[in-house]
Image (tube, rainbow, N blue to C red):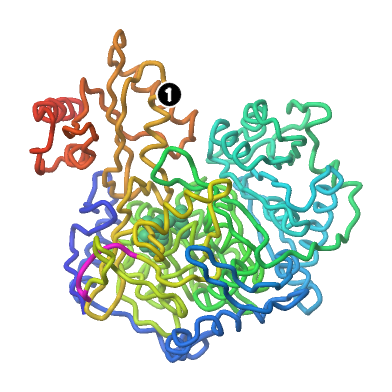
Amino acid sequence: MVKYQVIKKSKTASGEVNIMSDGISAEAMQAHATIEALLSENRVFPPPEWFRAQANVNDPNIYDTATKDPEAFWAQFARELDWFEPWHQVLEWDPPHAQWFLGGKLNASVNCIDRHVRTARRNKAAIIWEGEPGEERVLTYWDLYREVTKFANVLKRLGVHRGDRVVIYMPMVPEAVVAMLACARIGAPHSVVFGGFSAEALRERINDCGAKVVVTADGGYRRGNIVQLKRATDEAVEHCPTVQHVIVLNRAMDATHVPMLEGRDHWWHRLMEHAPIHCEPEAMDAEDLLFILYTSGSTGKPKGIAHTTGGYLTGVYATTKWVFDLKEDDVFWCTADIGWVTGHSYVVYGPLANGATILMYEGAPDYPERDRLWELVEKYRVTVFYTAPTAIRAFMKWGPQYPKRHDLSSLRLLGSVGEPINPEAWMWYHVYIGGERCPIVDTWWQTETGHILITPLPGITTTKPGSATRPFPGIEADVVDERGESVPLGAGGYLVIKKPWPGMLRTIYGDPERYVKQYWSRFPGVYFTGDGCKRDEEGYYWLLGRVDDVMNVAGHRISTMEVESALVDHPAVAEAAVIGRSHDIKGQAIAAFVTLKEGYRASSDLMDELKEHVVKKIGPIARPDDLHFTSELPKTRSGKIMRRLLRDIAEGRALGDTTTLADPSVVAALRQRYEEQEV
Ligand code: WTA
């Protein structure tokens, strides 16, 4: 077993993170002391017997069974879904192109709704929703059926045909799920754009996928403010020639104050008034596109990750069932926004395909107070809770008095996703949220993988705080060195996946070459994740963060190049280099180094303006935390920016090797400036 020595500092994606930061509350300090004591015991956590006994899967032999015949393993889950026509072949693997369930025909909305309304689940809650201002709504599976079929008819009437793309840019309201499932019903791939992206980012995504319709809302609530989604949509759509219609949900504003463009813009409620219920689902081929979701890669341009119907649905169905162990009376709360893949797979498709009850919450975790999430857990008797380490680290900093105000005894299982979870955060989650009773599943996956690939199975796996443990049954992962060779246990390297899995991306929308180059060329025939990983002596996986130019800021994937492009787009900027520096809550923070064009002077006003410019180009999630003006950037003799040095400077470390630098004095000057600005 690997021994972790984590007391005040712990490893995360970006290196050492000091948990004891300023502004920490007294309660948080006390909690930290408790955790320290627990950590020094090097404990491991076998599944509690009460959990194991009731788990959806508790037979450790399933790993061997799945390894021997992964196709049969996945097919078993696929058979639990509803198909119009069965497949004739489980997998066609022509590296790097996979097809799953060939010849099979199905519809994702039928699997998420119709098959439940034919059973006793008809009147079961599908979605329990709470708005940030406190409104409550419950949609049963039958309600969901009605709303989805009606909205599917609305889309059809507006001329959306099978294969047409629809962009969804909405707050966390049930209608966002309705819109996704309605698209799935008529075979129109959706592309959900996170409501925190700017008008320009939205425009880029709409144009990349050539959407015919955009579904949005007037606004959504965030910490008491209204995020003006319709205004951003108007700005975006102005330069989107493919968009014919914009559907607007009246969520947050007085409708009379929302400008609507005659012929193009339509109120959701008006269209729904006359829409008939029932809509024949399209029989989609297993390999037909279900959705496109944009994510950041190592270049400036976001990639449209393309997921198809049969394999994706099988993968999310299986992982939801086994990893989250959902039962008929569970209330599952995945806190992700539907704008991210976690929301797609574990708010919408996975849980609904399992006929589960999900909780959706619109707003911020600290609004109106820092106990909002725990209040909701208590109020709705949430049983399975899934969130990100960045949130857990924020809860830690706020202190345990907030969860302690509430009865969290309904919880039976906790999950983590989005970035490496440091052992302190794991232990805090275990003690203060899980009551030392709930197993924790640390789940590793990506937008590209579609569903969880590395994770404990809560009824089988002994967990270790900070490790995602081992690959899901049927997944063949490995850790390799520069040459693509497996490293021995105990060593670190690149995480790769060696065999296709059902929910894997099929391509990058509109850029099939980039798909091959990005994921399958580093080590031919093997999927390159872009993550570093270490395996301990027992074969447990410890994720180490990205090895490429992708930052993970508060669980959001942002590419350094994207932020750099946004900065150089400003007339004052000559050159920009962006790096992720370690941050005690967000995992990474964005640090930008900027050189100005002739005639521009560095000032704090310009600094604010440049940060705002990034917000305008991408969205608030990409706002640089620090911005440093410099007369030059450190470059190698061949002209490459040495990001490693910038990271050293931003994190206050001794500088590494600078011998390849074209002009070593640049670094010294930079460092000095940085230190001056730090005060
Ligand atoms: C990181 C989110 C460590 C990783 C589902 C990956 C994680 C990227 C974990 C994908 C985890 C996600 N432990 N790192 N449990 N889960 N990551 O596409 O770097 O938004 O490559 O998908 O998040 O981010 P994405």
Mark 1 CB lies closer than 8 A to ligand 1: no
Q: Nearer the viewer, residue 590 or 161?
A: 161
> Splitting the image into four quadrants, where does ligand 1 fall?
bottom left
Q: Seen in the image, is 647 located left or right of residue 398?
A: left
* Mark 1 residue type: Asp
- Number of marks present in the image shown: 1
Q: Is residue 183 in the magenta section?
A: no
Residue 31 percent across, percent down from the top left? 28, 62
Q: Tell me if I can see residue 401 in this picture.
A: no
Q: Nearer the viewer, residue 414 or 652?
A: 652
Please give the name of the residue rendered at 57% of the width and 69% of the height, measured from the top-left corner: 316
Q: Quadrant of residue 605?
A: top left
**Label 1 environment density (alpha carbons within 10 Å; few <14, some 14–19, many ≥20):** some
Q: Name the secondary structure under disc 1.
A: loop
Q: Tell me if I can see residue 616 in this picture.
A: yes
Residue 569 percent across, percent down from the top left? 43, 23
Name the residue carrying label 1: 569
Residue 541 percent across, percent down from the top left? 31, 71
Please give the name of the residue rendered at 38% of the width and 60% of the height, measured from the top-left corner: 528
Q: Residue furthest top?
A: 599
Q: Quadrant of the N terminus?
A: bottom left
Q: Is residue 492 in the magenta section?
A: yes
Magenta region: 488-495
Q: Seen in the image, is 426 located left or right of residue 220?
A: left
551 shown above or below 334 = above
Q: Quadrant of the C terminus?
A: top left
Q: Seen in the image, is 71 located left or right of residue 543?
A: right
